[in-house]
Image (cartoon, rainbow, N blue to C red):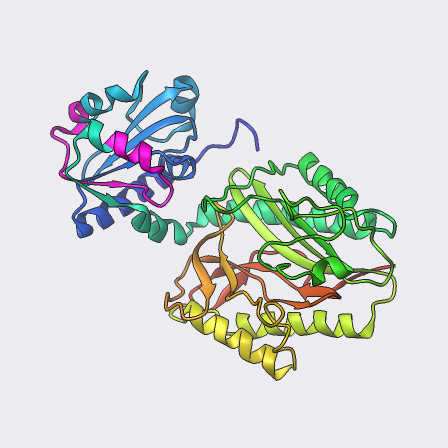
Amino acid sequence: MGTSFYVPADEIHHRTQGLQKKMQASGMGGVLIVQPVDLFYFSGTAQSGFLYIPAAGEPLLMIKKDIGRAKRESGLGQVVQISSIKELPDMMRQHTGPLPDVMGFELDVMPVAYFTKLRRLLGVENPVDASPLIFELRMIKSPWEIQQMDRTADLSRRTFEYMATAIRPGLTEMEFAGMAEAFSRKHGNSAMLRIRDFLAEGYAWHFLSGKSGGMIGALDSPASGEGTSAAFPCGAGNKRLEAGEPIMIDFASVMNGYHMDETRMFFVGEPPEKAMAACEAALSIQDAVLAEVRPGVTVGRLFDVSVAKAESLGYAEVYLGPPGNKVTFIGHGIGLELVEPPIIAKGRDIPLAVGMTLALEPKMVFEGEFSAGVEDVVQVTETGFRRITRIPERILVCR
């Protein structure tokens, strides 16, 4: 973190060229980018503004504020000041000539009213969704991006090590979550998670102790037991941690924009046999999935392998949730946003490719009792995978 962090200019250039190749293949004449994460990805700055990338030629970054900071941060050559959205058409025409008939927008996140305003202002005849092209490009991480994720992984490792020393009975879930976040923030976690889905919330931690993890919906929208609000029913509650109960901690960290999303099981004192066996089964399911990770294997195949392994271990009924409330995914891509394509879900035929980064999270729910699971972040390599997560691959029993 800090002002010394910049995206290298050659990274920005490579990303621009990649998008332009996809635009040319799809018939797009240009793309106008406004979403902050995409803006940062293609320009190196998240300052308020607009980025116009033509199908050929140099991009134009138009900044509302702060132009000085944007010029320092961005690796682009054309960075100009804009005082009003009404200036967009003239600036874009001066840069590239007549505007294209087919122009791409981030239609997965752009509000309808805002899109309508931009379309009318620019006179776009054929607006199209550029988000799929952007996702295809962002799914594959460069070596520089992997380095950033490695740094976040090291911060996460230190945070989990701290949690193992600080956890104790009597603390509420919320108290302990606050302690963990304070430690992580002190050591560089910006804690500003990026969530693209407008129906989702960015929440740094889910602490599910004992029966909190056994509530219906604990996997997709954790309702963490006593004291949670109907207006914000996730993260942690006022339930106190108890000796011997399973505690599932799902913690996200972010440094310089790059996320990690990891889960480990904790016990304070002697673990009950049933809970320990379930935690070990989750690790076995994870191992079975990782054995399949390599280029060309579909994400749907990973999902099917996980279900088959859970069935073989005798956990079919509780795997991915209790009967009638099961989720249909076991992980997701991760990077500049907490959840990115590909979603590792049932029936998805997206093939794995070198450079993808995945958060794999096989979990199970024993209704009214507890949850058990694990989550690691891995990188797809030419021969299989590399684990980015640096937390020990084990159940953390704290005496």
Report which quarter residue 397 is drawn in.
bottom right
In this picture, residue 220 sits left or right of residue 53: right
Q: Provide residue 373's location: percent of width, then percent of height.
A: 66, 65
In this picture, residue 87 sits left or right of residue 67: left
Q: What residue is shown at x 74% (from left), y 40% (from top)?
A: 178
Looking at the image, residue 64 lies above or below residue 289: above
Tell me, yes or no, whether the highlighted magenta stretch contains residue 109.
yes
Report which quarter residue 395 is drawn in.
bottom right
In this picture, residue 116 sits left or right of residue 25: right
Q: What residue is shown at x 36% (from left), y 26% (from top)?
A: 49
**Which residue lies most toward the left here?**
98
Q: Provide residue 345's location: percent of width, then percent of height.
A: 46, 66
Task: Give the extent of the magenta segment.
Answer: 93-118
Q: Quadrant where the C terminus lies?
A: bottom right
Report which quarter residue 393 is drawn in.
bottom right
Tell me, yes or no, whether the highlighted magenta stretch contains residue 113.
yes
Q: Quadrant where the N terminus lies?
A: top right
Q: How many marks?
A: 0
Q: What residue is shown at x 77% (from left), y 60% (from top)?
A: 210
Looking at the image, residue 361 lies above or below residue 42: below
- The foreground one among 8 and 211 is 211
In this picture, residue 350 sits left or right of residue 22: right
Q: Is residue 394 visible?
A: no
Q: Provide residue 32's location: percent of width, then percent of height.
A: 27, 35
- The foreground one among 337 and 222 is 222
- The foreground one among 37 and 121 is 121
Looking at the image, residue 296 lies above or below residue 359: below
**Which residue lies most toward the top here?**
83
